[in-house]
Image (cartoon, rainbow, N blue to C red):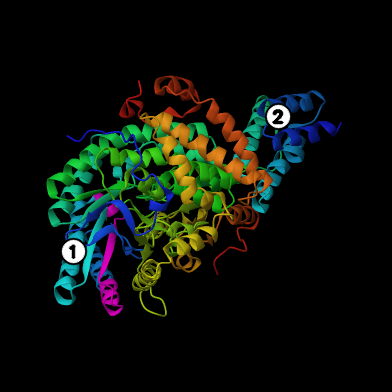
Amino acid sequence: MSTRKPVTSMAVNSIDELVYGKCKNPITTKMGIQIGGGTVYPELNHTLPPMIVNDSTIQEAYGIYKEMIEGILKRAVELHQDAVTIEYETVPDFTEHPKYGIESTKIILDVMKEYNAKYGIKSALRATPNDMREMKRPPIMRSGSFWEGMLEFFNGCGELGADYISIESTGGKEINDEALQMCRIDQIIFAMGVMACTDMEFLWSNMVDICNKHGMIAAGDSSCGFANTAMVLAENGYIPRTFAAVVRVASVPRALMAYEMGATGPSKDCEYIGGYLKAITGAPIAMEGRMACGAHLSPVGNIAAVLPDLWSNESIQQVQLLSGSAVTAGMEQLIYDCRMLNKATELGYQKQMMEILQESDSALDPHAYILRPDVIMQIAPEIIKSEDPLVRTKTAAACAVKVLKEAVAAGKVKVDDRDAAYLDIMEEQINEVPEDPAKFWEEIREDLDESKFVASEYNLA
Amino acid sequence: MEDILQELEEVIYSGDAQAAKSATEKALHLGYSTQSIVDKALLPSMKEMGEKLRRGDVFIPEVLMASRAMHAAMYALKPIISHYTGRRKGVIIIGTVAGDLHDIGKNLVSMLLSSRGFTVIDLGIDVTKEEFLESIQNYHPDIVALSALLTTTVPELKNIIDYITEAGVRPQVSIMVGGAPVTAKYAKEIKADVYTNDMFEACEAAEELIQRRISKYTLK
């Protein structure tokens, strides 16, 4: 059974080593694509148009998946792309009924193999099942039919030959949603630093074992339900941008847990703190930025492209555009972006390209600012000074507040006064957070709605 | 005398629940009726908070704090609230459809509607068509608000509307739908009454529907 091996030192010690396309510990897929070996590859995520999924419509859904993957690979061949990666992120029905998810995985893999045989194009598949445990409220995290279904799907993906597996796990989300709406960074720290990390130790122990059994790569766990929700709420003006940026950095220890349990990447596209993971673990990362705007808006469209090894679109649904299917168009956009990044490297302009991408965004939004490689290299070593997930999460949040306060004071990032005031509020709340999880639990529980989660599922007495 | 109502509004803006309760008690002591406290201080202040949020002058936590202060004030009025004869706003049932766990957007709509004085019955997430129907039969709402955030749960909106229609209660309620993948065109196809794009529009539409059973967001 996989156990946690805490990271205690940085894989990357110099900012010069932190670049796109290359990482300390590249991985190689089943068809021989080296990810993190010097080239950025596109990663296309695709999903169904609005439709009900059940036994009477599933054949239609399978047909759409086949049509989508054929369109994606056909266009990649036409654009002379020698390798692409695909993400199959299920909608809940496909994990809840593993037979649906497994059959669609097979359909996608069969077309990928067919295109490899016919045209020589290499491809790799990331399978991303849903965390179904939250379908029952309060969620039961370690047993029950939802958990069993997830295990069946994980195993099914492995047996079929998916290259790597990811998830957006939801442990701790029970209290995170309300904490986001109330801008309670102390509760966010509890949700991610205590609850999520505890759950991920259990979840990823299972996932890594399944990956080892099937020769699949364990590829990380996105904080989508935590930090991306914060980013989108801030983008709508509902919560402060500084708050969302601090939540983002505070999600690093949570994401790191998957790697400490045995994941080796590439991290998932919507894990925007991928740069921190790359610096700490040396694993390859997927990132999404401007090409994700078909799924959601963000203030980090360019800076997200500073460090990726896979460049992704988040997700796009099968709808018809003037040019053809949106999914096919998404592949074309990603291929052109990757060509540009890789050509810049080949011509010796990689650092200049990174600078353009970074400087075009980082002064305009705190979320973009905290993705700067120099900020990453400032905060990441502080996070891993402790092995304790709670201390790490508190440190990450505190460092983000400090960095942003300094940047605001120096005029390096644009934040209005109303928004900047939350940096002081957060600083105060963070200072009050105890570093002992048991003490923290005792102190915070009266503020939490305990009907929303089962404390024992998180080892909370 | 009006100063106390002004003071009550101010403490609601600042989200001070204790002060809101005290100011309400003081207003009662000075002889203000429940109706005047609600109509001249509580509802206008929460309406203004909603407007401030729409203008980008405040964030959600400030609106939630104000909402809590308003509820503290209402708590002080509770012993005599039965004497309140003012116009009661409508009852709204809200929920995210079956198979869908997204609740933040729905919660925000719910919060804003409550702060405008509607009685909101939030059924939560993953709500089945049977549960919606049962709630309509139990609570007799004016409006049913349905949310769906996944492409695969959007069709559930139609299932719910069809189910409510077949059960014969459709004429009793106005139905509002929303959620990122939902479009006005689709909402019209499934015979929803109103489609709104965000929580502010949802609130505006609810006000109009309650008054006239028709809104500028009504699907024609």
Apparent side of residue B99 relative to residue B79 in the rendered image (left or right): left
Q: What element does badge 2 sit on? A: helix
Name the quarter where the C terminus of chain A is drawn: top left
Q: Residue A118: percent from the left, percent from the top?
A: 15, 76
Q: Residue B25: percent from the left, percent from the top?
A: 74, 24
Q: Residues within 10 Å of mark 1 (few under 14, many from 20)?
A: many
The answer to whether residue B166 is visible is no
Name the quarter where the N terminus of chain A is drawn: top left
Q: Residue A213: percent from the left, percent from the top?
A: 12, 45
| Along the line of sight, the residue nearer the viewer: A415 or B158 | A415
Q: Which residue is mark 1?
A: A109
Farthest residue to the right: give it.
Answer: B1
| Along the line of sight, the residue nearer the viewer: A36 or A257 | A36
The amino acid beneath tag 2 is Ala
| Along the line of sight, the residue nearer the viewer: B85 or B26 | B26
Q: Residue at x 46, y 29 (%)?
A: A449
The answer to whether residue A429 is visible is yes
Q: Which residue is mark 2?
A: B20
Apparent side of residue A273 relative to residue A207 in the rendered image (left or right): right
Residue A332 in which image quadrant: bottom left
Q: Residue B138: percent from the left, percent from the top?
A: 46, 41
Span highlighted in magenta in the image:
A71-96
Q: Residue at x 75, y 27 (%)?
A: B23
Q: Residue at x 62, y 64 (%)?
A: B216
Residue A259 in which image quadrant: top left
Q: Residues within 10 Å of mark 2 (few under 14, many from 20)?
A: many
Q: What element does badge 1 sit on? A: helix
How far apart are labels 1 and 2 at the CA level? 62 Å
**Chain letter belonging to callout 1:** A
Is residue A91 in the magenta section? yes
Q: Is A67 placed above or below A304 here?
A: below
Is residue A177 in the magenta section? no
